[in-house]
């Protein structure tokens, strides 16, 4: 089996591809996998198997000269994608969303290669909607997204494929392994690129709660973009001297860190939500307002309506310290939210996708 993956821009698009690739390699050791990456995308540091590269970027939401340049890049990316496909000879192409998916899936369709796409969000992205006629199957995470696709026969509700580990680590054993002695662990992150408003709120949480609570460990990923600015603030406020505060640019061992968490503060990207559901964690979701169709708000709203998470919009982010403090002291509330969010986890997602890929290849 030869599988070519595409999709990028953020870890939320890359990690599903990694999860599917891991499943393929565990079940079919002689398989070959490769990834079509963007030039400077985070996939370059996350994907550890063979990579090809195309130069592509997303369209702006307004008419501009930049969009004209992007159209030329897109045409060149399609041409380059065809060359990659002819070199790698994939049996199937798997797209996991984002603008980088479009040229590869489009090129594969034109060359007669089997193609599938996985949509993580409740509101599908533009690339997914534009490609729905070009793919053989559409895998969905949220049932709510299916109303946006015309050919219902193509749709399979699989849930989100997850990287290995989110269902396997034991909380207490992991705390012992990583030398975390505090009773409670709060994990805070704003996605692979970081989120300025969440990072500013993290400082507030430390200033008004964590530094007075030695029994609470605060593990914070600022994203690479803000890391040095946040580190400078910690030093200026002498928070770098606090033994219960950790600052990282990116959390590479997220399954272990998630296992230890009692509370997780996160954006509401579909991948983050699926990882929270698999780990069964009490979550405070702060949707990014800067995403297409405000889809993160829709993701978070679905969970909040089911008592599975707390939703805080950015215009009310000033309340977050009080929310964290209240949740730390309310064991019953945390346990209830953990139970409800676990219901959103589909443990068989990786297996279903692997089987469907096999089925498509066998029908060539």
Image: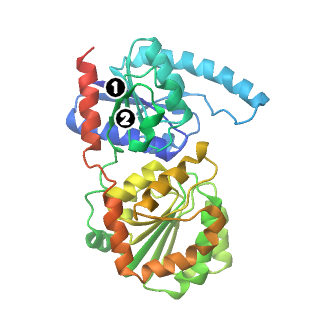
Instruction: Specify the farthest residue to the right.
Output: 65
**95 versus 231 height, above or below:** above
Left or right of 236 in this view: 172: left
Q: Which image quarter holds the N terminus?
A: top left
- Which residue is depicted at the point 37% across and 68% down? 337
Left or right of 191 in this view: 276: left
| Disc sitting over residue 153 in the figure | 1
Image x and y of residue 276, in percent:
39, 59
Say few, some or many: other residues with alpha carbon within 10 Å of mark 2 (under 14 / 14 to 19 / 20 or more). many
| Disc sitting over residue 350 in the figure | none
Identify the element where label 1 is drawn. helix
Residue 197 in view, yes or no = yes
Q: Which image quarter holds the C terminus?
A: top left
Left or right of 12 in this view: 165: left
- Which residue is depicted at the point 60% across and 64% down? 198
How many badges with numbers are in the image? 2
Label 2 sits on residue: 139
> Which callout, 1 or 2, points at the residue further toward the start of the chain?
2
Alpha carbon separation for disc pair 1 and 2: 11 Å
Closer to the camera in the image, 269 or 171: 269
Which label lies toward us, 1 or 2?
1
Figure quadrant of residue 26: top left
Closer to the camera in the image, 310 or 67: 310
Image x and y of residue 89, in percent:
37, 17
Residue 24 in view, yes or no = no
**212 versus 71 height, above or below:** below
- Which residue is depicted at the point 34% across and 54% down? 344
- Which residue is depicted at the point 37% across and 28% down? 152
For the rendered model, the colour scheme is: rainbow
């Amino acid at each position: 089996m030869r599988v070519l993956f595409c999709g990028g821009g953020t870890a939320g698009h890359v990690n599903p591809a990694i999860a599917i690739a891991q499943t393929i390699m565990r079940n079919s050791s002689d398989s070959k996998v490769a990834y079509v990456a963007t030039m400077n995308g985070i996939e370059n540091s996350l994907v550890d198997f063979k990579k090809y590269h195309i130069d592509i970027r997303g369209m702006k939401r307004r008419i501009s000269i930049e969009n004209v340049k992007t159209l030329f890049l897109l045409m060149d990316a399609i041409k380059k994608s065809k060359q990659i496909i002819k070199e790698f000879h994939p049996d199937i192409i798997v797209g996991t969303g984002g603008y980088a998916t479009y040229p590869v899936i489009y090129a594969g369709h034109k060359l007669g290669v089997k193609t599938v796409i996985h949509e993580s969000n409740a509101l599908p992205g533009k690339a997914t909607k534009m490609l729905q006629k070009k793919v053989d199957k559409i895998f969905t995470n949220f049932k709510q997204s299916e109303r946006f696709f015309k050919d219902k026969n193509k749709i399979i509700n699989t849930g989100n494929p997850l990287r290995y580990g989110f269902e396997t680590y034991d909380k207490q054993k992991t705390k012992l392994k990583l030398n975390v002695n505090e009773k409670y662990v709060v994990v805070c992150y704003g996605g692979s690129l970081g989120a300025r408003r969440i990072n500013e709120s993290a400082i507030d949480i430390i200033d008004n709660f964590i530094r007075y609570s030695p029994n609470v460990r605060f593990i914070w990923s600022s994203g690479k973009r803000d890391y040095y600015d946040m580190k400078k603030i910690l030093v200026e406020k002498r928070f770098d001297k606090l033994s219960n505060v950790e600052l990282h640019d990116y959390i590479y061992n997220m399954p272990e860190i998630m296992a230890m968490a009692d509370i997780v503060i996160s954006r509401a990207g579909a991948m983050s939500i699926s990882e929270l559901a698999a780990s069964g964690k009490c979550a405070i979701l702060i949707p990014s307002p800067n995403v297409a169709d405000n889809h993160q708000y829709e993701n978070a709203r679905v969970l909040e309506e089911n008592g599975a998470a707390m939703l805080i919009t950015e215009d009310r982010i000033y309340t977050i310290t009080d929310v964290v403090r209240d949740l730390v002291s309310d064991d019953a509330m945390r346990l209830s939210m953990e139970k409800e969010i676990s219901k959103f986890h589909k443990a068989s997602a990786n297996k279903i996708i692997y089987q469907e890929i096999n089925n498509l290849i066998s029908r060539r």
